[in-house]
């Protein structure tokens, strides 16, 4: 998408700025200097210009995070949580989640809203700590109504229930404020990009506050026939009545995406594209549209000193409709021995989802003895979801055939020769599934002098249904952590945590050997966090090992029961090992530099020998898991004119696609110019400065590698009141 590269201007990797140590509280040297503005026409001084120094620590770090359930000073927590603040989102001009992935060490793009997290494919998305992603199917989360994004690394089963072991995203939404503020902005860029947004928040009457916001943006893609049109309406009310606060919110998401759903560009085994990156398998009439409505209510209470309670209810109703031409196979159309075309399959799909989420937490904090403090968390969450799918598909041939989707050339694509209105009529397949997730958890944090010990346990129950098929089970997960504050500026940490994920209900067939136990994950991690020189020099060094076990594969014995169904076995294992280091330094009050490096080695460590369940073999690196990532970002703020310049870079090493094709390494650069004067702010962004052609990730051979965004330029102008 056009904005994907926007993630690198003010923070190429911005790892430390939003990384494991990124949540360090702003207790550093950062100061605010105020200079007189120009004299106005009436002789009065103009509005003062505020020049913020130590920007890395003031703007891009959160003093506390919500994703660990217990608010903590990062140096006092064994968790590794990456935080992307609202200021960083604004400075980058980020619009959707893909714009942010490279800000998080160990996280890289996989497909759509999915990422590779510490070597594992990860798609868990939470909002305000609850399940209920409004972006059904293949739409990518937008950021307009998001205050910050937190990524909790490693298995999080004890805190959030079922999930992949790489980590999870937690999107914190914007809430009504009790102080008035308003803003409006407009954006204009290449590829016919334009849009505007406005939001206002503040007190209304008594203890009542409100918020209202609108966002609209449209742009063409660099892919032929593709584009996007996004509208978001967001609002909320907050009522403060003494010891309690009630917040209600409602959001409407409306996306029209012509020429989607986009697959990749076919590539050879050496990772070179076989077509121009503008190539699209979709016709101009293809589309992917999303309508989603969300309502949320949250109650926060502090009934007694040292006791807090919160309860949140979230409802989501989403509908996604898409028609597209899926690449189905490459072939040589003229017999010269060179692959030059792709057959296509027309797909007509509709997805409905209706979900309810509820979560509640009670925290008791007390000093139980001199230099001894204890915090206890008791929590419960529940999720129910109904998911309906209606779809049909029609496979085409290698030549134009009446009633069937026609093929498409890789080198000289001609669109409009095939019309879905003339295709043979085929019936829809209807699938109705439902999920129930319920968990109880208990967490204790004991602080004795410089030592902090954490221990938690959770019991989960889950119930999956697919038509007449049903599978219910339960599981337990634990988490244990230890922190030693060597000094107020240095801490050593280590932790162990577990996760699980139910097998897909379609794989629980008793004739195939089911039901099967969930996949399991665990992590052992340790490292050091620092905030030296009053926070001017901040770093994190972490090493980890994550295992994922019980992955389903084909049974080597085949159909051992002679029942006509090949058996499966929960035997596969993947192991991820890695080291992450990041450093943020305020070189001067106006000059900041960030460097981040991540090493990851994710390999298949156990296989049934049949190859089932994996595209690769034992010992192979796992798909789309880069071994090395390196990023930098440096920004200089000119104090008097209110101008800042920035340069960032991003390197991702070689990977394998799902089908084992090479995905070539790449290095890209971005540049930014920011101007701030009183209530006005302008951001000029150039992404992929050198216009490099590269693959952001690999997929399967017939649909190719996902191409990275070519050079993109846009100007955003904003005004605040």
Image: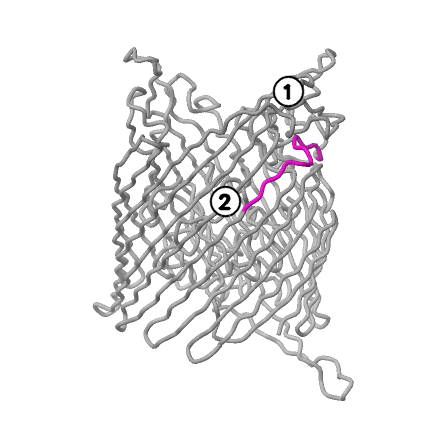
Q: Residues within 10 Å of mark 2 (few under 14, many from 20)?
A: many
Q: Residue 268 — which label?
A: none
Q: Main secondary structure of the magenta part?
A: loop
Residue projecting furthest to the left: 369
Disc 2 target residue:
319
Give x and y (percent) for residue 560: 29, 12
Number of marks in the rendered image: 2
- Depth check: 221 or 11 in front? 221
Give x and y (percent) for residue 550: 33, 29
- Depth check: 184 or 427 in front? 427
- Element at label 1: strand
Q: Residues within 10 Å of mark 1 (few under 14, many from 20)?
A: many
| Residue at figure coordinates x 43%, y 57% from the top left | 295
Disc 1 target residue:
330
- Depth check: 248 or 379 in front? 248
Residue 165: image quadrant is top left
Which portion, as a residue range, is magenta?
A: 278-290
| Residue at figure coordinates x 33%, y 50% from the top left | 159
Give x and y (percent) for residue 83: 49, 55
- Depth check: 386 or 582 in front? 386
Q: Is residue 9 above or below residue 682?
A: above
User: Quick one: label 1 or label 2, which is nearer the N terminus?
Assistant: 2
């Amino acid at each position: 998408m056009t904005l994907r590269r926007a993630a690198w201007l003010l923070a190429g990797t911005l790892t430390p700025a939003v990384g494991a140590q990124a949540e360090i509280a702003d207790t550093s040297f950062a100061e605010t200097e105020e200079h007189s503005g120009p004299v106005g026409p009436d002789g009065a001084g103009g509005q003062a210009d505020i020049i913020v120094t130590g920007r890395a620590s003031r703007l891009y770090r959160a003093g506390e995070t919500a994703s660990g359930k217990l608010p903590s000073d990062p140096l006092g927590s064994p968790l590794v949580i990456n935080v992307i603040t609202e200021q960083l989102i604004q400075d980058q001009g980020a619009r959707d989640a893909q714009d942010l992935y490279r800000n998080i060490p160990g996280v890289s793009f996989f497909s759509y809203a999915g990422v590779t997290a510490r070597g594992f494919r990860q798609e868990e998305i939470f909002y305000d700590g609850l399940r209920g992603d409004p972006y059904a199917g293949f739409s990518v989360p937008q950021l307009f109504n998001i205050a910050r994004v937190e990524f909790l690394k490693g298995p999080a089963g004890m805190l959030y229930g079922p999930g992949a072991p790489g980590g999870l995203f937690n999107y914190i939404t914007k809430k009504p404020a009790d102080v008035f503020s308003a803003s409006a902005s407009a954006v204009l860029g290449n590829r016919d990009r334009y849009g505007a947004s406005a939001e206002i928040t503040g007190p209304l009457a008594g203890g009542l506050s409100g918020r209202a916001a609108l966002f609209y943006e449209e742009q063409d893609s660099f892919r032929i026939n593709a584009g996007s049109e996004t509208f978001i309406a967001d609002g909320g009310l907050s009522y403060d009545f003494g010891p309690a606060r009630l917040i209600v919110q409602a959001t409407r998401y409306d996306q029209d995406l012509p020429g989607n759903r986009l697959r990749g560009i076919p590539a050879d085994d050496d990772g070179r594209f076989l077509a121009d990156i503008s190539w699209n398998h979709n016709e101009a009439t293809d589309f992917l549209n999303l309508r989603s409505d969300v309502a949320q209510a949250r109650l926060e209470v502090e009934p007694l000193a040292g006791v807090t309670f919160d309860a949140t209810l979230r409802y989501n109703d989403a509908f996604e409709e898409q028609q597209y031409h899926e690449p189905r196979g490459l072939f040589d159309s003229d017999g010269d021995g060179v692959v030059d075309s792709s057959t296509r399959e027309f797909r007509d799909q509709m997805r409905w989802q209706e979900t309810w989420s509820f979560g509640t937490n009670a925290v008791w904090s007390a000093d139980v003895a001199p230099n001894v403090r204890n915090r206890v968390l008791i929590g419960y969450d529940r999720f129910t979801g109904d998911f309906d799918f209606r779809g049909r598909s029609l496979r085409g041939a290698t030549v134009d055939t009446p009633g069937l989707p026609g093929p498409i050339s890789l080198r000289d694509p001609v669109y409009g020769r095939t019309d879905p209105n003339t295709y043979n009529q085929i019936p829809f397949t209807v699938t109705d599934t439902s999920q129930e997730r319920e968990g109880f958890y208990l967490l204790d944090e004991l602080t004795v002098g410089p030592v902090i010990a954490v221990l938690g346990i959770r019991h989960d129950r889950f119930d999956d249904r697919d038509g007449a098929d049903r599978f219910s089970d339960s599981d337990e997960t634990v988490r244990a952590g230890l922190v030693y504050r060597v000094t107020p500026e240095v801490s050593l940490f280590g932790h162990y945590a577990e996760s699980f994920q139910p097998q897909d209900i379609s794989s629980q067939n008793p004739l195939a050997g089911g039901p099967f136990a969930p996949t399991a994950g665990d992590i052992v991690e340790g490292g050091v966090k620092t905030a030296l020189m009053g926070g001017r020099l901040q770093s994190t060094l972490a090493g980890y090992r994550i295992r994922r076990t019980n992955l389903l594969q084909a049974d080597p014995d085949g159909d051992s029961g002679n029942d006509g169904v090949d058996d499966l076995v929960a035997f596969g294992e993947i192991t991820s090992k890695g080291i992450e280091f990041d450093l943020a330094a305020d070189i001067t009050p106006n000059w900041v530099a960030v460097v981040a490096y991540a090493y990851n080695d994710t390999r298949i460590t156990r296989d049934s020998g049949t190859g089932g369940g994996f595209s690769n073999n034992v010992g192979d690196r796992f798909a789309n898991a880069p071994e090395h990532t390196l990023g930098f970002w440096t920004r200089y703020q000119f104090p008097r004119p209110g101008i800042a310049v920035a340069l960032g870079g991003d390197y991702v090493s070689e990977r394998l696609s799902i089908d084992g094709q090479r995905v070539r390494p790449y290095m890209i650069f971005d540049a930014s110019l920011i101007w701030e004067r009183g209530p006005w702010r302008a951001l000029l962004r150039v992404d992929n400065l050198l216009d490099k052609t590269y693959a952001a990730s690999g997929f399967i051979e017939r649909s190719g590698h996902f191409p990275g965004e070519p050079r993109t330029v846009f100007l955003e102008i904003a005004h605040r009141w």
